[in-house]
Image: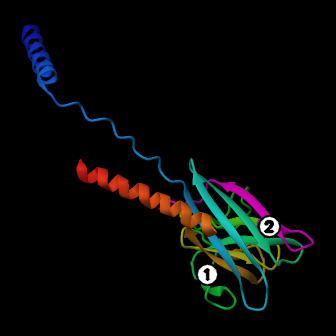
Amino acid sequence: MFKNRFAFALLLLAVIGGAYCGGAQEPPAPVEPPPPPPLTATAELSPTEGNDVTGTVSFEESNGMVTVVAHVMGLSPGLHGIHIHETGDCSAPDGSSAGGHFNPGGTDHGAPDGEMHHAGDLGNIEADVEGHGQLEITVDYITLSEGMNSVMNRAVIIHENPDTFAQPTGDAGGRLACGVIMSGMAGGMMEEMEGEMEGEMEEGMDDMDEM
Ligand SMILES: [Cu+2]
């Protein structure tokens, strides 16, 4: 038994050795796969009828976490509820087309750092005396990548009043601004990055064809 195995191993070595020494072909250089592009998305906020609230909300996913950065203008000073609503449709004058809170888990409403909340609950954004609000929050309960908790192509809503975290939706009042969450970064940077990514993806495809 051992002898047979030993003989087999020797034979194998001989064959491999022969292939190596005899072969004129160089082994193919390893192809480094391009690093995966960062997952980013942006919602450009448009005012609903009768107000002046605008802004940008950007999303970036890395290591299972999503960082949300919001800049909102035209608010009254103080806190305003900010949520992801389930439907990426801001066509209704009052923003109602965006539907209810994004709540794939069917849970109670709450604060982002609370024990229980909707996937779409981002808490409040606080506006200064000039009406400018900024919020940066990193959460582990939404994704940009595909899946049950993906917020891609859903809507960000900025509300008239503070989210009090009361049931069922925080009593935050009317919808002041709405924006659909779309893949990519904001403005010119987005086009630039997408151009690069497409180039890389095409190269990647060519490599696949050659294999
Ligand atoms: Cu809301």
Q: Position of residue 174 (x, y in %)?
A: 76, 84
Q: Residue furthest right?
A: 129
- Classify mark 1 as within 8 Å of ligand 1 or not, answering yes or no: no
Q: What SS does tag 2 mark? A: strand
The residue that appears at 68% across and 60% down in the rendered structure is 68
In this figure, which residue is indicated by the disc labeled 2? 125
**Ligand 1: quadrant of the figure:** bottom right
Q: Residues within 10 Å of mark 1 (few under 14, many from 20)?
A: many
Is disc 1 in contact with disc 2, using a CB cutoff of under 8 Å? Answer: no
Q: Is residue 116 above or below residue 85?
A: above
Name the image quarter holding residue 27.
top left
User: Does any atom of ligand 1 lie closer than 8 Å to the CB of label 2?
Assistant: no
Coordinates of residue 67 in the picture (x, y in percent) = 66, 56
Task: Give the residue type at disc 2.
Answer: Ile
Q: Residue furthest top?
A: 3
Q: Is residue 28 magenta?
A: no
- Horizontally, is 145 left or right of 73 in the view? left
Q: Residue at x 61, y 88 (%)?
A: 91
Q: Secondary structure at mark 1?
A: helix
Quadrant where the N terminus is found in the figure = top left
The residue under the point 84% across, 67% down is 126
Q: Quadrant of residue 48?
A: bottom right
**N-terminal-most mark, 1 or 2:** 1
Res 105 seen here:
no
* Residues in magenta, as a range: 124-148
Furthest-front residue in this view: 24
Q: Which residue is mark 1?
A: 98
Residue 201 x %, y %: 40, 57
How would you rate the neighbour count of disc 2 (Cα within 10 Å): few for under 14, some for 14-19, many for 20 or more? many
| Dot 1 amino acid type | Ala
